[in-house]
Amino acid sequence: MKFLPTEIPEVIVVEPDVFGDARGFFLESYHEKKYREGGIAGPFVQDNHSRSGKGILRGLHAQLKRPQGKLVRVLRGAVFDVAVDIRKGSASFGRWVGVELTGENHKQLWVPPGFAHGFSTLSDEVDFAYKCTDFYDASDEIGIVWNDPDIGVDWRLREPVLSKKDAALPTLKEVAKRL
């Protein structure tokens, strides 16, 4: 198992050991001791699963007072997964990293607390799963509009399908006033 820091070192790509043969494959999707040693301490308190069609963009989402760390992966399909540093005072504030996660490559991405998270779907259907370090609290949720020019994420989509809520999110400059 490999734990690979990205351009923002706190965001980590996990490449699990995959054991496969003609019958299929086996992998450990989480092992507390190995992940802790790899820089992902948890604890995790909530698991989520979403399904999306092609061209969907979900994000950018975070929580303000009770930030969630998220260990994300794709069970089926492909996404471009993005983490944006929104930690006030951070040297990488407003910077983003993105990784392609697929049901085929089995990679995971650790999005630490203090980062906004989102993904765009690259395949016809995506099953997306993630573990969270804190419980979801709708009253604590904040978000940043997907096409904020100050962040400049290349989502790999021309015209994404968005929820009404995500389409109306503020820019990072507006959110930063609350941080």
Image: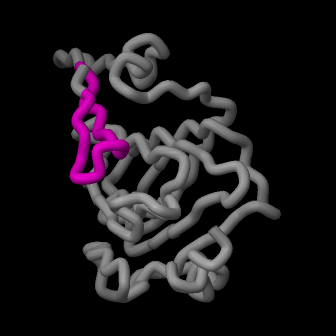
Q: Residue furthest left?
A: 21
| Residue nearer the viewer, 104 or 45 | 45
Give me the residue at 47% from left, 49% from top. Answer: 127
Give me the residue at 29% from left, 44% from top. Answer: 9
Give me the residue at 36% from left, 57% from top. Answer: 81
**Percent coordinates x, y for residue 167 in the rendering:** 57, 86
Residue span colored magenta: 3-17
Give me the residue at 52% from left, 41% from top. Answer: 130
Q: Was residue 9 drawn as part of the magenta stretch in this picture?
A: yes
Please, is residue 11 above or below residue 122 in the view?
above
**Percent coordinates x, y for residue 82 in the rendering:** 37, 60
Residue 123 seen in the current view: no
Assign the C terminus to one quadrant of the image: bottom right
**Percent coordinates x, y for residue 59 in the rendering:** 52, 68
47 left or right of 145 in image:
right
Q: How is the image coloured?
A: one colour
